[in-house]
Image: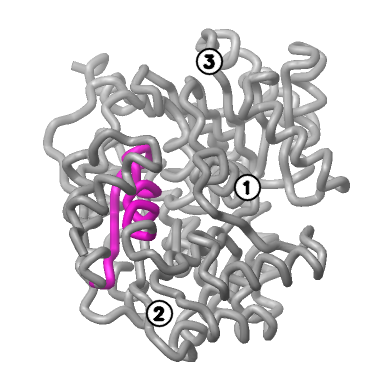
Amino acid sequence: MDIKRDIKCALHDLGFDKPRKHQVAPIKSLTDKQDTIVIAGTSSGKTAIYQTAGLVLHGLTVVIEPLLALIYNQVKELQQKSIPADYIDSTRSKTDEDKILCKAQKGKLAFLYVTPERLQNKTFISAMRQTNLTMFVVDECHCITEWGYTFRDAYLCIGDFIQNLPHKPVICACSATILDGNVDAIAQSLCMRYPAVFRSDLKRNNLILLKKDVTSSKKDLEKRLESRLKALKHCIKKYRGDGAIMIYTLTTAYVDAIYNFLEDIYPGQVARYHAKIQSEKLKRQMEMDFLQGKKKIMVATSAFGMGIDMPDIELVIHFNRPISMTDYIQQIGRAGRDGRKARCILFYDQNGDDQKIVHSLRKKAAQTSKKAADTIKAHYQQMQDFLSDTSCMRNAVLRYQGQNEQIICKCCTNCARERKER
């Protein structure tokens, strides 16, 4: 096998002339059948790494994604390039599922996308045991340590699936937000054998990180919400250009309230996305309207956005402080993917409104697992520490990811405040 030539052909099929410098080594590692962990910044081309390797290895590559929106986007893009790819989720009929698995067993499928929950399905397990499964990819692998102990324990069972295969595939795990110290835990959970670990520069110089205190003196919660909505309106008016805007919240109720508020101001320009939107068709329509630029403002919970590659998002606003640093880093990573400057504004309050939401989540989690409740508490403390930190915000984000940076950004809220105080 001429690996170099095969890599070149695979890249061509995927629509690339040549790999970026930081992609070369991990592609070679995977094609050499070495378990590999890729830690690279958002918009750095992690997907191209495992897709290229998957085509070179010629068998079936199973890709685990956390969100259906990610699955739909990636499968659609591969199919548009005439690469045999498909997905299985709860919306597929039994007939469709059987046809897809049959194609996989006959070697007529290059990529199969599923969520981790699918790995516990007996029909799927049986089919994969009879398939030439050459590579197994866990995209956004930080979900193993971030979500596995809280609300998606299926992530902790991936290793069992791998161990029960008749032949061990090459394992690839990738993310932009593996917090420092979690690499070994992820490798162990996935039963990886001496994985090669590749880290690229995670710095995003075009992101301007801002934080805004939206504490209100109003005693009534509804009045405090009105005050926060006014701050949101002001930020959009101040920073909006010709690009798209992402607004993240902690609850579905906040999504709906913000959507209704902004729809009055920007009629026909606002979309919303959360797990409780009743119609799956409506949810998909909202998503596509935003991704295709028909609507320029998206209001969503963390159920939307991870891995979404939309080039012109110029403003990301966290209406509530996120539940973890990983969520924060993932969500600001949606901004400025076309290289232009983009602002990321983090709202926080000292009324305790956001803290009450997290306390409610912890209380609910504690009913099933003390570890889940403790994990939520630890993650939220990370956000509290980040907000209290007075050093360069960009450098603080990089420290959480295990990268030390000495040069300050000079434009985040903390850097700007320091300049004013001189």
Distance, label 2 to label 3, CA atoms, is 40 Å
Which of the marked residues, 1 or 3, is nearer the chain's N terminus?
Answer: 1
Label 2 or label 1, whichever lies nearer to me, is 1
**Sequence-wise first label, 2 or 1:** 1
Which marked residue is nearer to the observer: mark 1 or mark 3? 1
In the rendered structure, the answer to whether residue 406 lies left or right of residue 116 reads left
Q: Residue 243, which numbered label?
A: 3
Q: What is the crowding at mark 3: few (fewer than 14 residues within 10 Å), some, or many (at least 20)?
A: some
Mark 1 and mark 3: Cα distance apart in space? 23 Å
Q: Report the residue that reaches farthest toward the right.
A: 278
Q: Residue at x 72, y 39 (%)?
A: 273
Q: Quadrant of residue 305?
A: top right
Secondary structure of the residue carrying tag 3 is loop
* Residue 138 position in % (x across, y down): 44, 64
Q: Is residue 167 above or below residue 410?
A: below
User: Residue at label 1?
Assistant: 72
Question: What residue is disc 2 on?
Answer: 189
Residue kind at label 3, given as amino acid type: Gly
Where, by quadrant of the figure, is residue 215 drawn? top right
| Category of crowding for the residue at label 1, using alpha-carbon neighbours closer than 10 angstroms: few (below 14), some (14–19), many (at least 20) | some
Q: Residue at x 75, y 40 (%)?
A: 284
Residue shown at the point (47%, 34%) measured from the top left: 334
Q: Is residue 178 visible?
A: no
Name the spot of residue 218 as percent of width and height, x first.
Answer: 72, 29
